[in-house]
Image (cartoon, grey):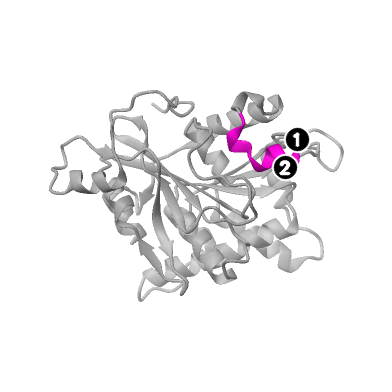
Amino acid sequence: HLHQGPPAASSPLALSIRSADECMAASAGKGSQDAATYYSGPLQLIRIDDDGKCHLEENAACILNQIQGRIAVVGVAGLYRTGKSFLLNRLLGLQEGFEIGPSVNPCTKGLWIWGQPVQLAPDYHCILIDTEGLGSTQRTASCDMQIFSLCILLSSYFIYNSMGAIDEQAIDDLHLVLHLAKHIHVKTKKGQEAERASELSQYFPNLLWVLRDFHLRLADSKGLTITEREYLEDSLKPLPGQDEKNKLREVIKDLFKERDCVTIVRPVAEESDLRNIQRLPYESLRPQFRTQVEAFVRKVYMSLKPKKIEGAFVSGTMFVNLAS
């Protein structure tokens, strides 16, 4: 019953589009059977203050509480200024949506959702989560791990966005967060011992590793052409004499049982165009880039599954409680 892509930007969903504040007023006292009132724009879901404390934002909670039935949750994370928001905008069928900016400062602060869930079926919606870019000078490493871990634990489908080939640094970045994510989950199960990574995997989303500005030929050690998934699996194979690095690879494989990879070339040749990509017509981007992005969109929508906790489908209201 899933669409192979997002609804067209102009396609009418069964929604009433208002401002976020109007949504709050309209939903007050509304019965669960009334039509949902959504907001066609980005809304902050979780704000992280300068002391590292998380705050659930009321407008986003209002939107999520109205969603009836099952939900899939797509979250994207990665280093800042690497085009995460662009990927989410393409999942919406938009060139402009989540904020994209030309400077070195991260545009997104905390965690944000798109205020209009993508309807996959009458009782099945997809929530898109954008996250503050990792590695900026404006946040500590502890805050980075907090943002990334929240995205992983809230998502049913997690997109990790990085530049170029899969290298040791990219794997290290994932492992730091996975260690914290394990700690967060275990801490909520009072009185029980820490579970092994393989047992924790049931709480973790599917992983799609997106490699941006990728220009290498995908080949194995014998020079034979391989798929993107095979490239990911080769990158996660243990290396002789590198016990510590191999532990990281095992943790990733244990926690993300369902994993895949997508490679995408650089979208434009000119650096100045790259800084203002949201202002360029989508049709003006490199044909190979557009083909790969469209394949990415199809893969995401064909791979989505409803989010579950302890075997039960998560509703909008349950998701808000989870985020709290």
| Camera-side residue of 218 and 65 | 65
Q: Residues within 10 Å of mark 1 (few under 14, many from 20)?
A: few
Question: Residues at badges 2 and 1 in contact (C-beta under 8 Å)?
Answer: yes
**Amino acid tagged 1:** Ile
Q: Is residue 112 magenta?
A: no
Q: CA distance from mark 2 to mark 1?
A: 7 Å
Q: Nearer the viewer, residue 164 or 53?
A: 53
Instruction: Report the span colored magenta.
Output: 269-280
Residue 276 falls within the magenta-colored stretch: yes
Please state, as top left, top right, bottom left or bottom right, where the C terminus lies in the image. bottom left
Secondary structure beneath dot 2 equals: helix
- Residue at the image position 63 percent from the left and 40 percent from the top: 276
Q: Amino acid at mark 2?
A: Tyr
Q: Which residue is drawn at the image coordinates 39% and 23% (left, top)?
A: 11
Q: Position of residue 285 (x, y in %)?
A: 67, 28
Residue 199 seen in the current view: no
Residue of label 2: 231
